[in-house]
Image (cartoon, helix red, strand yellow):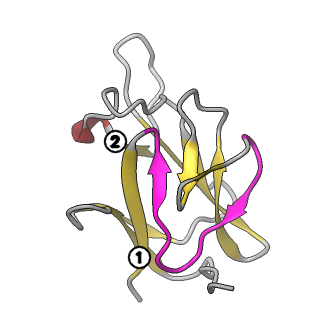
Amino acid sequence: MAETLIAAGYFELRLADSGHTIAKLAAPGVEGYVLGRLDSGSTYVPDIDLSAYEALDHGISRRHAALVRFHDRLHVVDLSSVNGTFLDGQRLKPDKPYPLQVNVTLRIGSLNLSLIKID
C-alpha cells in the first residue's frame, strides 16, 4: 500500500501535466482548504481559486473539493461537486475523506493536479 501524506509541514499544489505550481500551502489545520473557482454571480471566494486555469471549462464547481487534516493525515473531500473529484481515476463519494498518497493524481472536474510535500 502506498504511503499516505502526513498532515504536517508544507506542500505545493501543482498542475500534474506541466508541474506548474498553483499554490504553496501549510498543512491544513482544522478548517482545511477549499478548492474551487470564482463566479460573477456569487460573493464566495474559495481558499484556492482555480479560475486562472480555465476552471469553468474543466467543470470545476465554486466549492468543488477540500484538502483537510483527518487522523493527522492529508485527505481530500469532494464537496458534492457536479463533475466529481477523482484519485487515480476513481471517483470519490461526496462528503467522505479519502487519504492522499504519495504520487497520486488528484483530478477535480477534468483538471489533473498533484500535491507535493516540500519540506
Q: Secondary structure at mark 1?
A: strand
Left of 110 or right of it: where is 35? Answer: right
Which stretch is magenta? 94-109
Q: Position of residue 81 (x, y in %)?
A: 59, 32
Instruction: Tell me the kind of residue under disc 1.
Output: Ile
Q: Position of residue 89 (x, y in %)?
A: 53, 55
**Residue 116 image label:** 1
Give the vertical position of 101 relative to 63 (above or below): below
Q: Position of residue 76 (x, y in %)?
A: 62, 57
Disc 2 designates what residue?
50
Q: Quadrant of residue 93?
A: top right
| Image point (58%, 81%), residue name | 8
The front one of 26 and 74 is 74
Q: Main secondary structure of the magenta part?
A: loop
Identify the residue shown where x is 45% and y is 15%.
Answer: 42
Identify the secondary structure beneath mark 2: loop
